[in-house]
Image: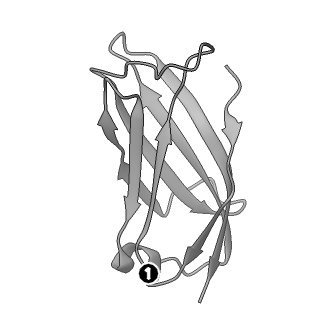
Amino acid sequence: MTPGTYDIKVIRGVTWERVFTWKQPDGWPRDLTGWSGSAKFEPQGSNVPTLTKIAVIDGPAGMITITLSDAETAAFTWEVGEWELELTDPSPKIWRLIEGQVNVRE
């Protein structure tokens, strides 16, 4: 599976939150019951995450929520970075669902 691309903008010192729904080809949400996930944020070209967040998963609805607190976004000392969302199914197989660029501004 090729991950989707989703670029984000974060305001330093402000809470950031996004909810994603993984849908099947028929449009219905994929049941993510028993899955876990995390999102990693890092400066561009670093390959060392500045922050790793546990994703909150609503299994039957296929919803994945990522929340960064105001303190966490304040700690981003960089302006351009990258992020990725990976989910682990019960088998446990790892799926990279989304990746993209992070732009941090004041």
Extreme top residue here?
91
Image position, residue 51 (x, y; %): 44, 61
Q: Please name whichever residue, 77 or 64, is drawn nearer the observer in this view of the structure.
A: 64
Residue drawn 50% across the image and 51% down it: 40
The colouring scheme, among rainbow, by chain, secondary structure or one colour, is one colour
| Left or right of 20 on screen, residue 47 | right
Total numbered badges shown on the rendered structure: 1
Image point (61%, 39%), residue name: 98
Residue at image coords 51%, 29%:
22
Q: Residue 62 appears in which quarter of the rendering?
A: top left
Residue 14 lies in quadrant: bottom left
Q: Is residue 9 left or right of residue 56?
A: right
Compared to 97, does 38 lie above or below?
below
Q: Amino acid at mark 1?
A: Val
Residue at the spot 45% in from the left edge and 75% down from the top edge: 73
Q: Which residue is mark 1?
A: 14
In the image, is residue 46 above or below residue 58?
A: below
Q: Residue farthest to the bottom?
A: 106
Q: Quadrant of residue 16?
A: bottom left
Q: Secondary structure at mark 1?
A: loop
Residue in front for this viewpoint, 23 or 10: 23
Q: From this viewpoint, which residue is outermost toward the left? A: 34
Task: Decide: few, some or many residues near mark 1? Use Cα within 10 Å; few <14, some 14-19, many ≥20.
Answer: some
Quadrant placement of the N terminus: top right
